[in-house]
Amino acid sequence: MLGVSNPGRGLAGTATCALCHQSIDPDADAVVTPDFLADETDPFFRFSDATMHRACFVVWDKRKLFIAHLNRIARHLVAEDGTYPQMTSEGDLVQRPPQAETTRSPHLVLPARPTNSDPPVNN
Ligand SMILES: [Zn+2]
């Protein structure tokens, strides 16, 4: 046939939605998941390193389970700067700061009590 290249194909245009299995337009609003699962027996394995329409993602009945699963694993995917990825309920990936950065400690720091443990010196 005619050798006209289809401008919609190639590189970024070949993604397929992991939920509805239809192609995703390069400029469509899509959710891209990190490659966070190495276990092929994991029920969410095919949603690791996957692309989905955001419209499909937000109505996915396992969305909350998936996000909780991803975030639990992603906590261990700590980058060199100590941040780790977490997914919001909308499907956006954000880098969370290292946990040591939490400034407000829930623990009360009690003032050190003066101790009278030093026995009086008897002359
Ligand atoms: Zn879809």
Image: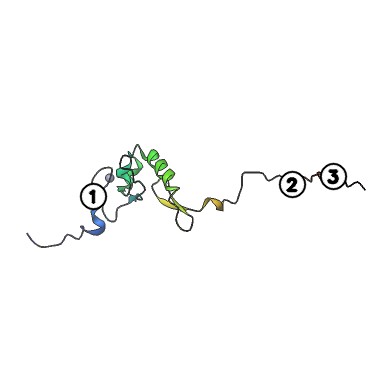
Query: Viewer-nearest of labels 1 and 3?
Result: 3
- 39 relative to 72 in the view: left or right: left
What percent of the width, then of the height, locates residue 38?
A: 34, 46
Q: Residue at x 15, y 62 (%)?
A: 5
- Which quarter holds ligand 1? top left
What separation in Å lies between label 1 and label 3 (alpha carbons)?
81 Å
- Pointer 1 residue: 23
Q: CA distance from mark 1 to mark 2?
A: 64 Å
Which of discs 3 and 2 lies nearer the camera? The answer is 3
Q: Residue at x 48, y 58 (%)?
A: 81
The mark found on residue 119 in the picture is: 3
> Is label 3's Cβ within 8 Å of ligand 1?
no
Q: Amino acid at mark 3?
A: Pro
Which residue is labeled 2 in the image? 112
**Residue occupying image coordinates x 23% and y 54%:** 14
Give whichever of discs 3 and 2 has the lower sequence position.
Answer: 2
Residue, far left = 1
How are the residues colored? rainbow
Amino acid type, label 2 = Ala
* Residue 73 place in picture, x, y as percent: 42, 45
Q: Could you tell me which secondary element the residue under label 1 belongs to?
A: loop
Say which amino acid is labelled 1.
Ser
Q: Secondary structure at mark 3?
A: loop
Above or below, 64 against 25 in this view is above
| Callout 3 crowding tier (Cα within 10 Å): few <14, some 14–19, many ≥20 | few
